[in-house]
Image (spheres, grey):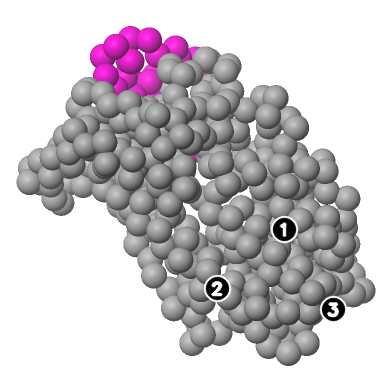
């Protein structure tokens, strides 16, 4: 078979790219090694920047998001119980939307009408320096897709980046010695907005998926096991890290999902290899502290869609030639902010008492400076 663009990966990045190309009349196919149910079962972050909301609008996938999503004017930071609310609306006239990644994926699945091949085995890109094609196996039969371009949207562990010669890649990475133990619970959120808390016992986050479903996290060593954390132990630890008033208001219940997410910063450069392009988690990973992962992925494919449309319809290579440099500029800004938020809010035993005093001084400076608050608001909302 032949298509103009072969997209590897049917997560939100791949689905969004496929939808934008479809709208422009570009013939694209999506190949995914997992089932639709597996893709929808991934529990991920759910804070959308204004740019991501606008992209959902552009894709025609935003109706349910606007009905059910929660608009937030700001968030709260806490340091050893001291609270600071950041009012994004007042500071820079921006807001964010709380809407789960699973819901974004579902909405894009529902509206996409182009071909999507799920449960594809041994998906592999080939000859992307000249005449690209993708092979895969399904139901015991080998298949080949000839195409003009390949978009690798298949995540950190996907085949797209792994198919690039190591000599052509430069990798930047930091792996943190801790992770986030997360619990999903069918209880109303403890607050109307997200709460990021630093405590000497470790970081904590009070988040939400809807008005009746909450997501909570605590920092744990990378060596921890989910099996060692009962619900009771988790709720006790979370309360210990929150402001006393917040801890008192917390409504707990049986967890409906519990997992540990490792934290890492990762960037691959460049993002174009002939006619193969990397986007989303295939290109970069950020710690979840700054709520950048999904937003960066959507930003990537928004830019990539425009570049591919320009190449295939307008017959200009200007967009695809600029893609890697353009996208990496935004990626590194988001990496910097995510690193900064992680450094401020987590405990790092190796830095000792001096390190915690520096963190406290940073928090106090933020609390006393409108300029610093505006900078945080710009970065958090993605309007840098």
Q: Residue furthest right?
A: 1
Residue at mark 3: 146
What range is drawn magenta here?
Answer: 232-259
Residue 294 seen in the figure: yes
Question: In the figure, is residue 254 to the left or right of 88?
Answer: right
Viewer-side residue, 321 vs 140: 321
Q: How many marks?
A: 3
Whole-percent x, y for residue 9 in the image: 70, 59
**Residue 186 among magenta residues:** no
Whether residue 255 is visible to the viewer of this picture, yes or no, is no
Percent across and percent down for residue 332 are: 41, 62
Q: Disc 3 on helix, strand or loop?
A: strand
Q: Quadrant of the N terminus?
A: bottom right
Residue bearing mark 2? 324
In the picture of the structure, the residue carrying the numbered disc 1 is 17
Question: Which residue is painted at 46% across and 27% down in the image?
Answer: 73
Q: Is residue 318 left or right of residue 140?
A: left
Give the mark toward the camera: 2 or 3.
2
SS assignment at label 1: helix
Q: Position of residue 39 (x, y in %)?
A: 69, 46
Q: Nearer the viewer, residue 246 or 256?
A: 246
Q: Are marks 2 and 1 in contact (CB under 8 Å)?
A: no
Q: Is residue 25 above or below residue 34?
A: below
Q: Is residue 83 above or below residue 8?
A: above
Question: What is the CA distance from the residue labelled 2 to the residue labelled 3?
Answer: 23 Å
Q: At x 31% / y 19%, what residue is drawn?
A: 239
Which badge, 3 or 1, is on the more N-terminal residue? 1
Q: CA distance from mark 2 to mark 1?
A: 16 Å
Q: How many angstroms separate mark 3 from mark 1 (CA)?
A: 18 Å
């Amino acid at each position: 078979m032949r298509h103009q663009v072969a997209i590897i990966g049917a997560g939100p990045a791949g689905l969004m790219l496929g939808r934008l190309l479809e709208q422009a009349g570009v013939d694209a196919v999506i190949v995914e090694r997992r089932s639709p149910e597996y893709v929808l079962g991934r529990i991920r972050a759910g804070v959308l920047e204004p740019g991501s909301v606008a992209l959902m609008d552009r894709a025609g996938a935003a109706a349910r998001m606007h009905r059910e999503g929660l608009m937030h004017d700001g968030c709260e930071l806490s340091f050893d119980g001291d609270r600071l609310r950041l009012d994004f609306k007042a500071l820079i006239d921006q807001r964010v939307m709380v809407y789960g990644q699973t819901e974004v994926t579902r909405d894009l699945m529902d509206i996409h009408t182009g071909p999507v091949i799920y449960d594809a085995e041994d998906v592999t890109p080939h000859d992307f320096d000249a005449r690209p094609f993708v092979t895969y196996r399904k139901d015991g039969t080998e298949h080949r897709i000839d195409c003009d371009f390949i978009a690798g949207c298949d995540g950190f562990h996907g085949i797209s980046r792994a198919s690039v010669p190591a000599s052509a890649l430069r990798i930047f990475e930091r792996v943190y010695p801790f992770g986030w133990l997360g619990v999903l619970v069918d209880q109303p959120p403890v607050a109307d907005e997200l709460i990021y808390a630093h405590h000497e016992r470790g970081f904590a986050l009070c988040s939400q998926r809807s008005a009746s479903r909450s997501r909570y996290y605590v920092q744990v060593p990378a060596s921890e096991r989910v099996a060692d954390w009962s619900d009771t132990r988790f709720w006790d630890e979370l309360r210990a890290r929150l402001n006393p008033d917040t801890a008192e208001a917390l409504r707990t219940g049986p967890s409906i999902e519990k997992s540990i997410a490792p934290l890492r910063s990762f960037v691959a450069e460049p993002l174009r290899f002939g006619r193969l392009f990397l986007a989303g988690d295939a290109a970069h990973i950020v710690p979840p502290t700054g709520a950048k992962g999904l937003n960066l992925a959507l930003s990537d494919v928004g830019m990539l869609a425009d570049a591919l449309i320009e190449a295939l319809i307008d017959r200009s290579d200007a967009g695809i030639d600029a893609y890697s440099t353009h996208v990496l500029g935004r990626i590194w800004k988001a990496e910097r902010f995510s690193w900064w938020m992680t450094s401020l809010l987590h405990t790092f035993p190796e830095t000792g008492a001096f390190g915690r005093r520096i963190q406290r001084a940073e928090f106090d400076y933020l609390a006393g400076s409108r300029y610093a608050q505006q900078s945080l608001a710009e970065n958090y909302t993605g309007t840098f």
